[in-house]
Amino acid sequence: MKTFQTVKGMRDFSPEEMEKRQLVLDTIRGVFEKWGYLPLDTPALESFELLAAKGGGGEEVKKEIYYFKDQGGRELGMRFDLTVPTARFIAQNPNLVKPFKRYQFGKVWRYDRPQQDRWREFQQTDVDIFGSSSPKSDAEIVSVVCDVLKNLGFKEFTIRINNRKLVESFIVSLGITDFVDVFRSIDKMDKIGKDGVASELKKKKVSEKNIKSILKFIGGKIVPELEGKEELKNVMEEVASLGFLKNVKVDLSLIRGLEYYTGCVFEVSLGGKVSVAGGGRFDNMVEKFGGKSTPAVGISLGFERIVNEMERRKMFNVSKKKVFVAGVNDDVRKNVISIADSLRKSGVLIEIDVMDRNFRKQMECASKKKIPFVVIVGPKELKDKKVVVKNMESGNEKKVLIKNLVNYFV
């Protein structure tokens, strides 16, 4: 019989892997909610017209997404991020109380060529503020991410920040009209260095004088009073007041999301070239999707990269108090169920036999599943209202009164 495989670019996750992933999601959720963000969920499918509108991608987007027509002939696509569906939701619901602070976890799909750390289906975790144009909201988004990374256990990380308006104003002040093309070269600074950027700009017919000015600017040596400078300054001051300035630095070479970011932009690094999050201000998106003009700022955490990096650094410590309640024979089955039920109600993770196995097979099952404790229920101990608790790692056994069993594990 044929054995079926996963679809190209998709993955299964074993229970062991899912425990780690769930731990990360639970930690991120806890921080988001602590800062006052509420959960939102949106459909996996959206109209192709909506998906094609982001950044003016048009028909070319079909090559990058899962696109199809349904049985009614409607053009649809699987969402490629969580921002577009959320902006559509905001446009559809203009009376939401502002600021609307939401977080969202969900799968997204992109028709990329599968390669290391790049899959066609992957998890995203987003946090956004809609309705505030204040630099305080930019600073809060940055600070929330700092708090997330600290709670996950990362000691060293950097959030680079820049302002799109400041860089654009400077490039235009040099008399360069095709600033977007110049942006594309500047944004490669962390990959190709100053010499590489200079070489690219030279090929794009930028004058030697302007190249020198651009390199001085992105190096922070010349920062004239231009649009966006005050915004950037205010964001940094607010980040400082929130207590996260140590992990945030201005980088005037950072330019991302050329098609839709309108102000501050952020990128999060865990050292070296391990980028795990990116975002910024996108004040025009909701309006583009038919809604009222709504300022917005947010960031998307690269969940897959964070999990991979935590795995690589051996940061996971998934220690849950799992207990197997084993009956010595069928006569104690009701007692097994009663004891298991009382432990579950106290929050202990419990498993009991559902395959009519004898006592030896139950113990083998607990061992293979690496369940750390087994509660052994036998008729002899029950007469004294006790059970035996066995530590599966050490092999030690201890008799415990049933009435004290919850306190033993909680």
Image (cartoon, rainbow, N blue to C red):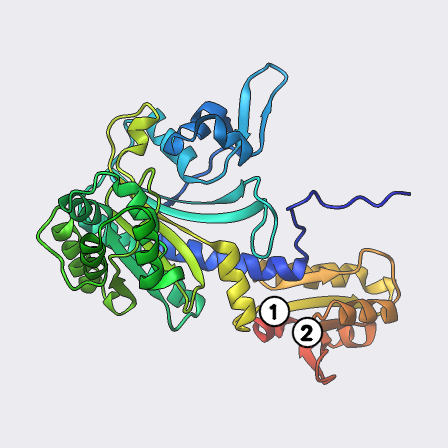
Q: Residue at the spot x=16%, y=45% of the render?
A: 169
CA–CA distance in space, label 1 to label 2: 7 Å
Above or below, comparing residue 141 to residue 111 in the picture: below
Disc 2 marks which amino acid? Pro
Above or below, comparing residue 10 to residue 42 in the picture: below
Q: Secondary structure at mark 1?
A: loop
Horizontal side, residue 300 vs residue 331: left or right: left
Disc 1 marks which amino acid? Lys
Q: Residues within 10 Å of mark 1 (few under 14, many from 20)?
A: some
Q: Quadrant of residue 381?
A: bottom right
Horizontal side, residue 16 vs residue 220: left or right: right
Q: Residue furthest top?
A: 72
Q: Decide: marks 1, 2 in contact (CB < 8 A)?
A: yes
The residue nearer to you, when weighing 365 against 188, is 188
Would residue 129 be visible to someone looking at this image? no
Of the residues under marks 1 and 2, which one precedes in the sequence?
1
Q: Secondary structure at mark 2?
A: loop
Horizontal side, residue 379 vs residue 171: left or right: right
Percent coordinates x, y for residue 36 in the rendering: 31, 50
Q: Quadrant of the C terminus?
A: bottom right
What residue did someone put label 2 on? 372
The residue nearer to you, when weighing 75 against 99, is 75
Percent coordinates x, y for residue 247 in the rendering: 29, 67
Q: Residue at the spot x=82%, y=67% of the render?
A: 362
Q: Residue at the spot x=71%, y=75% of the render?
A: 386
Q: Quadrant of residue 341?
A: bottom right
Q: Residue at the spot x=61%, y=20% of the render?
A: 70
The residue nearer to you, when weighing 42 against 113, is 113
Horizontal side, residue 225 vs residue 120: left or right: left
What residue did someone put label 1 on? 321
The residue nearer to you, when weighing 34 against 222, is 222
Q: Quadrant of the N terminus?
A: top right
